[in-house]
Image: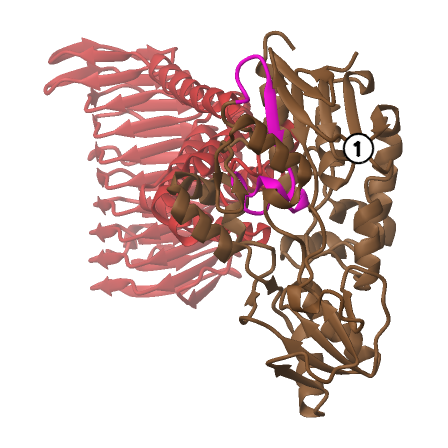
Amino acid sequence: MPRVAVVGSGLAGFTAYRTLRRALGPGEIAVFGTDADPAAGWRVRAAAIRQREMRSESDGHTSPTSFPGLALSSVRRRRSLRPLLDSALDRYHPTVDEFLAHVERERERSGWDESVVLRRVERVAAVEAGFELDGEPFRHVLLALGHPGLNVPAELRGDPRAVHSYEPHDYASTVTVVGAGLAAATEWLNALAEGAEVVSVRRREPARRPLNVPRHYFTRRGLAGYHRLPPSERVERLRTLTAPSYPPGSAWDEPLARAAAEGRFRIGEAVNGARQVICATGFLRGFRHDPLLARLVSEHDLETADDWLVLEPDSTVPGLSDATRTLAVAGAPGQWAFPAADTLAGARYAAHRFLRRIQACRTR
Amino acid sequence: MSYTLRGRVETRLAALLPVLLGACVLAGALHRWWPVELVALMAAVGLFLDLEAWHRLFPYQPAWASVPVGVVELAALMAIVHGFGLHAPLIPALVLFGVGWLTAFVLAQAGFPLLRLGYAEDGGELGRVGAVAAVAIALAFGGSAATYVVRLPPVVLLSAGVHQGPLVITRREVLRGAPGAVVRGGIVVAHDDVRIENVTVVGGENGITVDGVRGTVIDGVTVQGAKLDGIHVRLAGVVIRGCTVDMLGNRLGQGIDISFNMDMGMSMVEGCTIVGGQQGITTHSSATSIMGNRVSRTTGQAISVDEMSMGMASHNAVRDALGVALYCGDRSMCMFDHNTVIGTRPDTSSGLRNRRGFAVLADFQSEADLWRNSLTANPVAAGAMTGATLATTSRPSW
């Protein structure tokens, strides 16, 4: 009977599963989710914004180790050393197709389907030396719940013109895009390419950086200082780090500059007059939007800070993890431990530490 | 990669470990210490730059930055090697550095991430492996240093007074004379890596004979009254420094004769004083550097580079030579620069054209390049005979 459970069968859960498989067999791990395809949700969203390239780089994959990365498999597939060279220059970004093919390939190899239990977990309860998932006992549990839902600004809910960027859609002749992150920037270019006039409505100017957060926050170098911050400062830091951003580069700037010169792209104050409003406003934020997390916090009186569930630096839940049991959080709700938790690198970070805890547990 | 300082150092040391082990093997095979010295220097330069430069300059270090980082480290390394006079051959040293750089690059980009799950997010820290690597490096360097010390040749102190020779040295050792130590009857070096210091040698067939061995160093010796040559070197690599050879009264012997050692690398005669003898310093089929010596009152040639030798005579002072002062003969290739030749005398009794008192003579298809020599009061300043050539250039033709 499995003693380790992963709640969530998306990419974060899959990444964790592949890490766990280094030490455990498929029969020792139970993955609870609503879809056996780990890329199911992500695929729909990427298709909706017509994303062709990943923002992540060679190590943006689901494998336990950062090497070999996707650049190496691209070398084999493209029969060119260019991906490796680009990777050395931090200019390599796998295509969405390459990434999805990688997920599919690894899904088959890893024994994932043997471990997946198609069932939504409603409740996690701490019990003696472990946890019960809807009554089923496990000693070590990783919550990889994903985003709790799409975020649509309150004033646009029910507006027939509004569609979320991550929902399938076409483009009208005049489009207002609300938001300023990667999805918004992608939508500006998509709509312009379709011949639309685009108005960008934003609350603040987006940051321009290659990855979701500055690079040193992906390693202990930046994380050590981050983990030392008192809660109020850490909340502020998280708000700064998770503010909208998209990569720098002429591939983004030139089409916008050209369209602006033609009068087809401008920054506006409001959504007035557009035939279509695309909400590139990302996901609902905060543990309160996730019923399972909200209940967990409430029933166990867990510490929170603003929207975030407070976690140890190793992504475990304080008070519910000790030498005999582990409750850890991966994916977006794990930002308290790792600001880029909603990336593949973030999923790997939580997975590595989860595995370490399991291996250190004498009674596992 | 955004390295932590600890991660940077651990990665550096762990990546250096296989290179150090390779260098130890190489040192053992070559019986030379430069590979280990070079790797130790690579470690020192790398760690210094890690602590003082790279960690501050690179909050994030992309893979491509390994190239300029490597170039800077190589430049610093070579400057130190040159500045401290470490005897590392250039090309093998560059190859060793290149292997080290490539090993570090491959390990940092592929090896360590495969070896340690959290390598990337831990900022290059290797945990126990890093600590083990640091200890292993310390042990390897410590072991090498201990081996070096243990393998230092024994020092034989020669007390003041006269010691009856000939003294035959048949093991690796340092023969060090106390002030007033004299060996009568000559010294024969019959083993590799022998060093002779501060000894006076009187008499003997040759004052000091070095035959068929490598790595001999003769430093600060005085030779007097040898029947044949003062210092006689055959098929052997030597360094002779600060010697005094008195050959007065010996018309046929050579002060220093280094011959037939072309395959033993570069030999050197430096800072010696030779008086008398047929030839002061002579080389035959040899590659020898002759620098900063004082040679006088010779009866054949003061300094002779002969019989297909390749030689450089530089900053020597020659006085009162009979017939020829600087000689380049028999298809040899010579560079004579910054020498001072004064008062060469013609050998009229020989009746030979090539003994007319040349300060510099190139003979029989030899090639001599001259640069900034001071030739004063010599019957003939410079000449070339029987197909030899003389050229004035700062760059030797070879």
Q: Nearer the viewer, residue B218 or B187?
A: B218
Residue under the image location 59 percent in, 16 percent down? A325
Could you tell me which quadrant the N terminus of chain A lies in?
Answer: top right
Write down which chain is painted red.
B
Say whether residue B6 is left or right of residue B129: left
Q: Nearer the viewer, residue A272 or B288?
A: A272
Say whether residue B363 is left or right of residue B200: right
- The image quadrant that residue A40 belongs to is top right
| Residue B241 appears anywhere in the view | yes
Shown colour of chain A = brown
Q: Nearer the viewer, residue B369 or B281?
A: B369
Residue A250, horizontal then vertical, whole percent? 66, 74
Could you tell me which quadrant the C terminus of chain A lies in?
Answer: top right
| Residue B253 appears anywhere in the view | no
B91, above or below A274, in the image? above
- The image quadrant that residue B232 belongs to is top left
Examine the residues drawn in magenta and state their main secondary structure. loop
* Amino acid type, mark 1: Arg
**Range drawn in magenta:** A320-344
Residue A177, horizontal then vertical, whole percent? 70, 73
Q: Nearer the viewer, residue A242 or A149?
A: A149
| Residue A334 counted in the magenta span | yes
Chain letter for the residue marked with disc 1 in the picture: A
Say whether residue B157 is left or right of residue A256: left
B39, above or below A148, in the image? above
